[in-house]
Image (cartoon, rainbow, N blue to C red):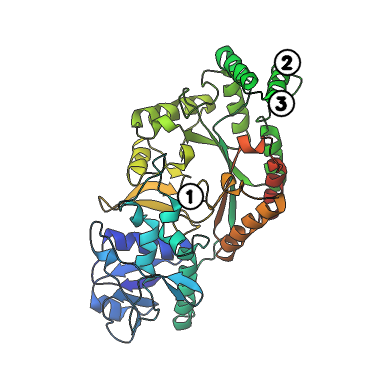
């Protein structure tokens, strides 16, 4: 049991210490603000404050974990033995940076509360992030800092107990268009055919009619292949189905279609089924709850996991809506067209709402690899190499490697055989 002395126990402080020590390092911790309790403690102990008490293991604290609200902080990112870090400390601090304040800044998405220019879908642009501008988006720095701190801690307290965690890989399949041509209803099907003909897309005309005549299966209907791959390598998978009415950005098969419902039920026999929330439900909690309930009725079990359409996250409103809709876990924390660790970590963490200074009961599962971020790859080998870089980083810290692939891309007609690429990713990186 590690005792942490500080001058003030705040929600930010508790949240950060539990994430770093308990969830990343597997160390049991207790806090105190009483000097006499700290002195009496005979086990491992550290001080996190402005000044040390004696000659103990001391980390000089930044003010960030002890204040309220949002300020436009001036942050200077420096090199800490090969790893970017910020919030420099002064002697006699054992480490030269306040990694706890820096971790909170990234995990709570502090920069996303500040003014920024949103993209066309209302998203935070990755190029505006502190990680991108300082070239550490490709690193799970929160986990790296934590393990570097553990090394220092073991030098002082060799007997300290740290439960080693196991590397995990979860395969996410996004199903926002379950079929390309099938089950779309007569009006949408004829309209699609006329559009293809009018734009001289004869290959799609042939594909479309072949599916209608049942000569070929729908190109997006790759579910049996995906499940077989996942069963073969015993990989944990989650299929996120969009189950929403038609709109400008939501063009999946109708939730009233019985074939679609049967597909979802059949997938649910082998994998976890979750909700890919519609574009329309982004700011509509009532609609979000309705989609959740309808999907739950199809699989006859609770729907606890969510992903937002186009990875749209508006801090803090998106997570407040998900909490109100009673989701327990979300898998939207990442970027669609940019690889990297948006929150600086490969460890699941709870959402901290800075506006009300409170940890919320929804766990965020950050991802670094999204198939749409790989579309600029010139070959399958190049795409695999990009994925390997992120796998290696997660593996080093025994983190949670989450990959996002969409059934549309896996079934699409591209230069890269995406289904073959997916198979190789699962084969290479499932352990």
From the viewer's perspective, tell me whether residue 379 is left or right of residue 188. right
Mark on residue 203? 3
Q: Residue 338: in sight, yes or no?
A: yes
Contact between marks 2 and 3 (CB within 8 A): the answer is no
For mark 2, does the 10 Å Cα neighbourhood hold few (<14), some (14 to 19), or many (20 or more) residues? few
Q: Nearer the viewer, residue 92 or 389?
A: 389
For mark 3, does the 10 Å Cα neighbourhood hold few (<14), some (14 to 19), or many (20 or more) residues? few
List x then y, in percent, for residue 361: 36, 46
Nearer the camera: disc 3 or disc 1: 3
From the viewer's perspective, tell me whether residue 141 is left or right of residue 392. left
- 412 above or below 8? above
- 321 above or below 80? above
Q: Residue 26: in sight, yes or no?
A: no
Residue beneath label 2, please? Answer: 213
Tell which residue pokes out farthest to the right in this image.
215
- 103 above or below 199? below
Residue lying at 46% horizontally and 48% vertically, measured from the top left: 333
From the viewer's perspective, tell me whether residue 113 is left or right of residue 338. left
């Amino acid at each position: 049991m590690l005792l942490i002395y500080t001058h003030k126990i705040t929600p930010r402080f508790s949240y950060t210490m539990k994430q770093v020590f308990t969830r990343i390092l597997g160390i049991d911790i207790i806090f105190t603000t009483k000097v006499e309790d700290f002195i009496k403690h005979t086990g491992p102990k550290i001080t996190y404050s402005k000044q040390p008490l004696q000659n103990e293991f001391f980390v000089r604290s930044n003010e960030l974990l002890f204040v309220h609200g949002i300020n436009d902080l001036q942050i200077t990112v420096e090199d800490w033995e090969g790893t970017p870090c910020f919030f420099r400390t002064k002697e006699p601090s054992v480490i030269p940076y306040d990694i706890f304040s820096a971790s909170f800044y990234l995990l709570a998405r502090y920069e996303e509360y500040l003014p920024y220019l949103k993209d066309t879908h209302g998203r935070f642009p990755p190029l505006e992030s502190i990680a991108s501008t300082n070239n550490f988006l490709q690193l799970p720095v929160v986990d790296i800092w934590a393990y570097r701190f553990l090394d220092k801690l073991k030098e002082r307290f060799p007997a300290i107990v740290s439960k080693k965690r196991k590397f995990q890989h979860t395969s996410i399949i996004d199903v926002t268009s379950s079929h390309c041509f099938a089950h779309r209803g007569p009006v949408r099907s004829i309209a699609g055919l006329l559009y293809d003909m009018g734009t001289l897309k004869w290959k799609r005309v042939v594909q479309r009619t072949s599916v209608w005549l049942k000569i070929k299966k729908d190109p997006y209907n790759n579910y049996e292949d995906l499940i077989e791959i996942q069963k073969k390598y015993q990989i944990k998978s989650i299929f996120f189905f969009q189950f929403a009415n038609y709109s400008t950005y939501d063009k999946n098969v109708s939730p009233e279609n019985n074939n679609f419902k049967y597909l979802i039920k059949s997938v649910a026999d082998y994998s976890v089924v979750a909700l890919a929330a519609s574009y329309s439900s982004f700011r509509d909690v009532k609609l979000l709850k309705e989609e959740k309930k309808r999907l739950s009725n199809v699989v006859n079990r609770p729907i606890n996991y969510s992903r937002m359409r186009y990875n749209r996250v508006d801090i803090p409103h998106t997570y407040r809506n998900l909490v109100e809709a009673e989701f327990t876990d979300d898998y939207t924390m990442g970027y669609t067209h940019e690889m990297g660790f948006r929150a600086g970590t490969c460890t699941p963490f709870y959402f901290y709402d800075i506006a009300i200074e409170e940890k919320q009961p929804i766990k965020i599962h950050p991802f670094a690899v999204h198939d749409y971020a790989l579309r600029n790859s010139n070959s399958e080998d190049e795409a695999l190499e990009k994925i390997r870089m992120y796998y290696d980083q997660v593996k080093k810290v025994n983190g949670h490697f989450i990959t996002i692939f969409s059934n549309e891309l896996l079934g699409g007609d591209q230069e890269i055989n995406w289904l073959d690429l997916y198979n190789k990713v699962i084969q290479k990186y499932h352990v």
